[in-house]
C-alpha cells in the first residue's frame, strides 16, 4: 500500500493549525482557571481532567474533517466550508477567553450559542463535500451543547 505524502501533509497542516488554536486557547485561559475553580457550578459538571481530554479529541476530529474536505475536488464548496471552519475556530477560541479570563458568563453564553450555530452550519457544509467529514463533527456539536448547559449554569449560579 502506497502512502500519498501530499495528503499526509494536508492532514499534518490541519492538525497543526487546529491544534495551535486549541493549544493557544488553553494556554491563555489557564490564567482564568482559578476564578472558574471557585465559581458555583451546575449539576453534571464533570471533573476538570475530562475537559482537556475531550477537547483534544474534538480538535483532532476537527482537523481530520477539515483536511478531508480540503482534499475534495469541489473547490467552490470547499472554499465555503473552509470559511465556516475558520469562523467557528475563531468563535471557539474566544469563547474560552470570554468565559475563563473575563468571567463574562452571560456574553460567553451568547457566544457559545453562535458557536453552536456555526458548528451546525459546518456539519452541513462538510457533509455536502464529504459525508464522513460531516459526521465526525457530531461529537463536537454534542459537546458544545453540553458546554452551553454548563456555561448557562455557571452564569445563573454566579450572578
Image (cartoon, rainbow, N blue to C red):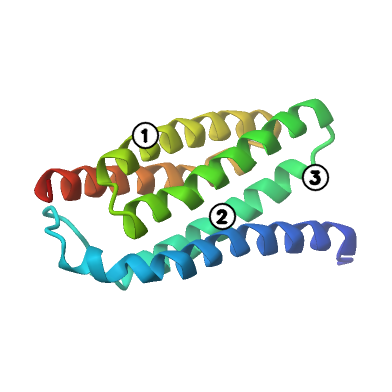
Picture coordinates of residue 31, whole percent (x, y): 37, 70
Real-space Cα separation, disc 3 to disc 2, in angstroms: 15 Å
Residue 112 vs residue 142, the one in the foreground: 112
Dot in front, 1 or 3 = 1
Q: Which mark is residue 61?
A: 2
Q: Is residue 102 left or right of residue 136?
A: left
| Label 3 CA crowd tier, 10 Å (few <14, some 14–19, many 20+) | some
Does dot 2 land on a helix, a strand or a loop?
helix
Q: Earlier in the sequence, mark 1 or mark 3?
A: 3
The relative height of residue 80 versus residue 141 in the rendered view (above or below) is above
| Label 1 CA crowd tier, 10 Å (few <14, some 14–19, many 20+) | some
The relative height of residue 154 versus residue 2 in the rendered view (above or below) is above
Tell me where residue 64 sits by quadrant.
bottom right
Picture coordinates of residue 50, whole percent (x, y): 32, 68
Q: Is residue 23 left or right of residue 39?
A: right
Q: Residue at x 63, y 35 (%)?
A: 126
Q: Residue at x 89, y 66 (%)?
A: 2
Q: Earlier in the sequence, mark 3 or mark 2?
A: 2
The N terminus: image quadrant: bottom right
Q: Which mark is residue 57?
A: none
The C terminus: image quadrant: top left
Does dot 1 land on a helix, a strand or a loop?
helix
The relative height of residue 133 versus residue 14 in the rendered view (above or below) is above
Residue underneath mark 3: 71
Residue underneath mark 1: 113
Picture coordinates of residue 89, whole percent (x, y): 56, 47
Q: Residue at x 16, y 61 (%)?
A: 39
Real-space Cα separation, disc 1 to disc 2, in angstroms: 21 Å
Amino acid at each position: 500500500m502506497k502512502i500519498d505524502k501530499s495528503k499526509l501533509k494536508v492532514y499534518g497542516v490541519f492538525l497543526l493549525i487546529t491544534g495551535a488554536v486549541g493549544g493557544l486557547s488553553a494556554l491563555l485561559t489557564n490564567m482564568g482557571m482559578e476564578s472558574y475553580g471557585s465559581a458555583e457550578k451546575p449539576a453534571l459538571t464533570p471533573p476538570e481532567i475530562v475537559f482537556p481530554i475531550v477537547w483534544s479529541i474534538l480538535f483532532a476530529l476537527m482537523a481530520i474533517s477539515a483536511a478531508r474536505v480540503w482534499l475534495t475536488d469541489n473547490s467552490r464548496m470547499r472554499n465555503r466550508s473552509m470559511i465556516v471552519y475558520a469562523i467557528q475556530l475563531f468563535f471557539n477560541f474566544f469563547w474560552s477567553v470570554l468565559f475563563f479570563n473575563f468571567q463574562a458568563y452571560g456574553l460567553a453564553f451568547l457566544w457559545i450559542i453562535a458557536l453552536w450555530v456555526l458548528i451546525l452550519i459546518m456539519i452541513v457544509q462538510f457533509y455536502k463535500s464529504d459525508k464522513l467529514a460531516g459526521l465526525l463533527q457530531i461529537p463536537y456539536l454534542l459537546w458544545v451543547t453540553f458546554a452551553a448547559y454548563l456555561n448557562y449554569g455557571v452564569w445563573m449560579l454566579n450572578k
